[in-house]
Amino acid sequence: MRKIIERDKIEHNKKTTSLYETLFHNANGYIGIRGCLEEEVPADWDTMRGTYINGFYDIIPMKQAENLCNFVEEKQTMLNVADTQTIRLIIDNETFSLDKGKLWKNTRTLNMEEGYTLREVVWESPKGKKVQIKVKRMASFSQLTLFSMEYEVTALNFTGNIKIESYHIADVTNYSNSNDPRMAAESARHLILQDMIVTNDESIAVSKTQKSNLTMCSMVVHKVQGNASTFAKKEGNKGIYLVEARVEEHSKLTLEKYSVFTDSIRYDNVVEAAKTDMEAILKNRLAYYYEKQKIYLAHFWKQTEVEIYGDEGVNQAVNFNMYQLLQSAAKDCHCNIAAKGLSGEGYEGHYFWDTEMFLLPFFILTNPDLAKMLISYRYDTLDAARENAGRLGHKRGALYPWRTITGVECSGYFPSGTAQYHINGAVAYAVVNYYLTTGDLNFIVEKGAEIIFETARLWLDVGNYSKGKFVIHDVTGPDEYTCMINNNYYTNCAAKYNMRWAAKIYELLKKNALIEKLSETLTLTEKEIDEMKNAAHNMFLPYDEELGINPQDDSFLTKPIWNLEQTPKDDFPLLLHYHPLHLYRHQVCKQADTVLAYFLFEEEDDDIMKKSYEYYEKITTHDSSLSTCVFSIVASKLGMHQKGYDYFGDSAKLDLENTHGNTKDGIHTANMGGCYMAIVNGFAGLRIKEEGVSLTPFLPKEWKGYQFEFRYQGNLMKVIVLKDEVILKLQEGSETWVTIYGKKYLVKQKIEVRSKKNVASSYL
Ligand code: BGC
């Protein structure tokens, strides 16, 4: 299967430009460059010209109109750094621009096997000169500091002068939109240029942040193919490289542009680091890096491949989503995965629970080493989480921030930010998920146990006993349309899980004589572990006898039900049209909450889950992109296969078809991870628990079959689901037990396990 996303005859205009900037961005987990048009765009076109370094931020004061005790007063924001993607083209004094002349061809391509984007344009100038422009761009996975461009111009119907002006612009600001809470409200100049050196061979810009005291360097080198004269100059905060050539009809001029980005979080001397990298890079030409990119991706696809037989559109969408996860995920321990990856400034480059609940499941199953590094980020920020807990008045434990870059809480509106204590449950869940899937006890000893104990401790401090039950007050669950409530079903389940696992890990380490040192460092006693066991055992989980469902929280069912049918279409997402208090006083959900608990914690019997599912389905808007994927997984789990498939469809193409209308601000990484889970955990029913691996696959009737691979405790397994059988193959490893539809099979090398069942017949 060719992994190519193509957009033909793109109509660039005011609205669509920024959408394509997101869809065709280039990123490698360290740098991200939006797929902007190289040339300037008309002033009224919506564009977010952005280049980002994962984890590179400045600090902004967060003014609280009424500053109560210990409110967050400043936040971090991911910075837009130097622009090296701008290139102007002038053909015999006519400047290339999409709003002038005539477009014969205008396509964008993302090649996910080779890891580049391609823009192809055939343009006729107002005076009738026709050129073909091809721009190939790549953020290198093998050389993380490198972003390359190959700008090729062919004279199609004339012989004349072609001039290329290639820019290195250090004078940049962030994007802002004060009408959308998902974007930064104000734009300020965060990066101050310290130094810019422009010579004929290279340009180097060094900039420093206003408050966070960080420095970054961008370095650009050009290479020209074809006979041309070149000249470099500095104009204010810009380096400009000029290429001029007389081009014969049908011949071409090509400019290779190498940009290297370094920052002081990773390097002591950013300029030296950039120069060293550039020098090494230039020992080879671009073809070498294209080849390395291909090899890197061949390896990635080999371990992650999900293939759907019989639906090419969905296949492409699923691959697109997985590719974006790779582009977004940190490749070093200094950062994590932002809600929008490195594709845009939505949510200001912050890391949320999205990583642990929606993205790590993918990486744990397909790339455990990377998963370990992503979880280590939470270990490295544990002290900040302890401080956060202290600021909120907790005497013990750690509370992870709702949104952050360095580990410090950055959410300004605490009811739907800091109050989401369930983030602690998410982090603990990820540690357990990683451990169960990999069996990596070392990680638990070195980092995981401390995370689990400190997060579990916090629940003891947040909750209290009432009438013999452990209750948790004044928190917000995943659903942000219901805030600051008591006994959120999801949060209580997460707390229960967190504390139960703290006790289990304690026993495990004790059994292996590994607990002593950690207990001493954390002053953790058996008494405290017993408190956790008791609180978990006595955890109050709301249940309504009359409806036979789990209420989202203590007061949820007493509120009036929001009439979604009567709500005008233009009023969605509701958060942009109604005051939060108005939303909080209704039964209306932004996203899966209790329903998500059913997938993760599996506390209830099917009847309760089904009734609850149907109840919440009617009042959920899915205004959050983290929702439909969860409704899909749980529908599949409960045997509602058609619903499972339909919700999956909404999730799979969310960004490719811009169904939430805000892909222009960046991709929705959590949904992309959720789309993967909808196949693997939903359709195939994969579960990894203490008892081992189990599968309960079904085949959506729209498909002929599907397959995926996953890693389990050192084994690589391939699952193929066909109409009347499930095939399991051990690709790497020795042997392992797998339960399929409740029956245990020993999967060994070279022996395929076939479970004959009319897989499709379970379709309702
Ligand atoms: C969702 C959160 C999510 C955040 C970042 C919000 O709209 O409600 O659950 O963490 O987006 O993706």
Image (cartoon, grey):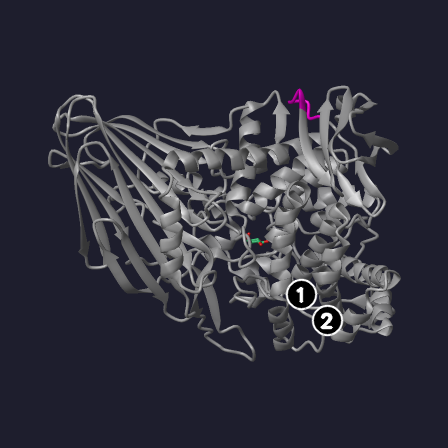
Q: The residue tagged with tag 2: helix, strand or loop?
A: helix
**Local secondary structure at mark 1:** loop
- The earlier-in-sequence mark between 1 and 2 is 2
Left or right of residue 685, residue 7 in this image: left
Residue that mark 1 sits on:
475
- Proximity of marks 1 and 2: CB atoms separated by less than 8 Å: yes
Report the number of discs.
Answer: 2
What range of the chain is rendered magenta?
699-705
Label 1 CB, ligand 1: below 8 Å?
no
Q: Is residue 646 left or right of residue 209?
A: right
Spatial CA span between label 1 and label 2? 9 Å
Which image quadrant is residue 249 in? Answer: top left
**Foreground residue, 266 or 603?**
266
Q: Quadrant of the C terminus?
A: top right
Q: Amino acid at mark 1?
A: Val
Residue 83 x, y percent position in the rendering: 32, 51
Question: Which residue, as the protein is rendered here, is positioned at the far bottom?
Answer: 69
The answer to whether residue 598 is left or right of residue 653 is right
- Give the residue type that dot 2 points to: Val
In the image, is 292 to the left or to the right of 260?
right
Residue 320 at x, y = what percent? 52, 35
**Residue that mark 2 sits on:** 462
For residue 553, say whether it is visible: no
Up/down of 228 relative to 705, above or below = below
Q: Nearer the viewer, mark 1 or mark 2?
A: 2
Residue under the point 60% across and 43% down: 673
